[in-house]
Image: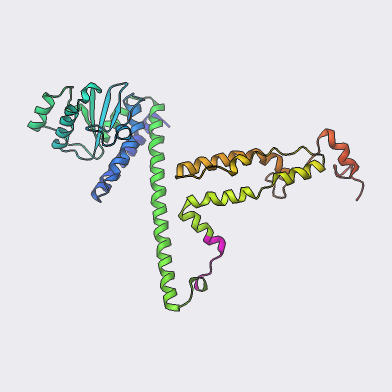
Amino acid sequence: MTRHELLQRSSSLLGRFAHEVKVANAMGLFDINTVAEDVLVPIFAIAFNCPDLCNQNRIQMNFPAVDLGCRTSRLSIQITSDSSSSKMQETLEKFDSHGLGSDFDNLYVYVITERQKSYTSQKLTETMNSLSIKFNPVSDILDYQDLAKRLGELTNEQIENINDHLEAEFTKTDRNLQFRSNLDAFLAVSQQKIEDEKRTKKYIPSVFVETSETKEEMRYFANPMFFYRKIDDDLRRIDLCGFNELLGMAKIEPVADNLCEIKTLEVPNNLSELRKRFVQQSIALEAIEEPVSPFSYFGKRAESFAPSDHSASYWNVFGCGSSKSKLGY
């Protein structure tokens, strides 16, 4: 992708982000502003060259005046969807009243919707003149268009990293919207089933035939936190001890059993812990897949067992080697 295409993409993504925040606020969904703080951290960290930038509200609940801060570069950013002069004045007054000038030399206000064309309020001007740090509304009050221009000063790699981050966030949003749409459709069908049950005076399965497998999968879909229990149950049914005993009788090296550690993992409390749990289990299962697969009827690569050199003669004696060495049974 050329630099021009990268910049066009970043401008489009930032514009979409601003539009979605504006729509969410219009619908009264003001929690989007809190979400926006976390989404914007990695973007500002790159754009303003402050890798230690972090959400101040994660450090101290209801941190005053600013939302993001980097004490290394002494830069702070207030994130807001309110572009009014009174909001700017309030932010500056809180910044000084809480003595934040001792921690930060620069203050930016980022309007996640769209900033005003100008800020000429007399009260705002008076507040700026008495501020402990320099503040210029022309350069220090930003919106997505100003941020897009600032990205033009970055390297292609930095722009691409920002684009990747925004696209990943939108992908998560789109998935949530799709899930919501699917859930609404499922609830509509379920409601229809209930109405049919009332009308026919029959239990739902007699009207809509559903297999137990379908019902079980639906439970996991509705609540992924239930899914790990099924994984644990399946893992407990894997008996490598018995399998290794058979391998020993056939003079074959046993398969290393490293499944014990993934059969007794801690119960996950959230989706993040659940994902880490699945990754750990997947790694352990992949480790035994290669040595076990040749003995499986469902082997992915249609493997066939070949005896090791030191046991080849043993297998030949019992007619279990290659087709050329079999005794004709």
Query: How many marks overall?
Result: 0
Magenta stretch: give its range.
207-215
Residue 161 rendering spot, x and y as whole percentages = 41, 31
Residue 200: % across, % down:
45, 78
Q: Is residue 209 magenta?
A: yes
The residue positioned farthest toward the bottom in the image shown = 200
Residue at 60%, 44% (x, y): give it. Answer: 263
Q: Residue at x 14, y 35 (%)?
A: 85
- Any part of residue 149 in sight: yes
The reply to whether residue 118 is visible in this rendering is: no
Image-quadrant location for residue 49 = top left
Relative to 247, is 26 on the left or the right? left
Residue 23 or 128: which is nearer the viewer?
128
Residue in view at x 23 percent, y 49 percent: 26
- On the image, the x and y values in percent for residue 199 come to 42, 77
Give the quarter of the image for residue 52.
top left
On screen, 106 above or below 261?
Answer: above
Viewer-side residue, 148 vs 69: 69
233 sits to left or right of 242: left
| Residue 165 covered by magenta stretch | no
Q: Quadrant of residue 249?
A: top right
Color style of the picture = rainbow
Placement of the N terminus among the 4 image quadrants: top left
Pick out the residue farthest to the left. 122
Picture coordinates of residue 97, whole percent (x, y): 16, 28
Q: Is residue 234 left or right of residue 320?
A: left
- Would you place residue 44 above or below residue 194 in this image? above
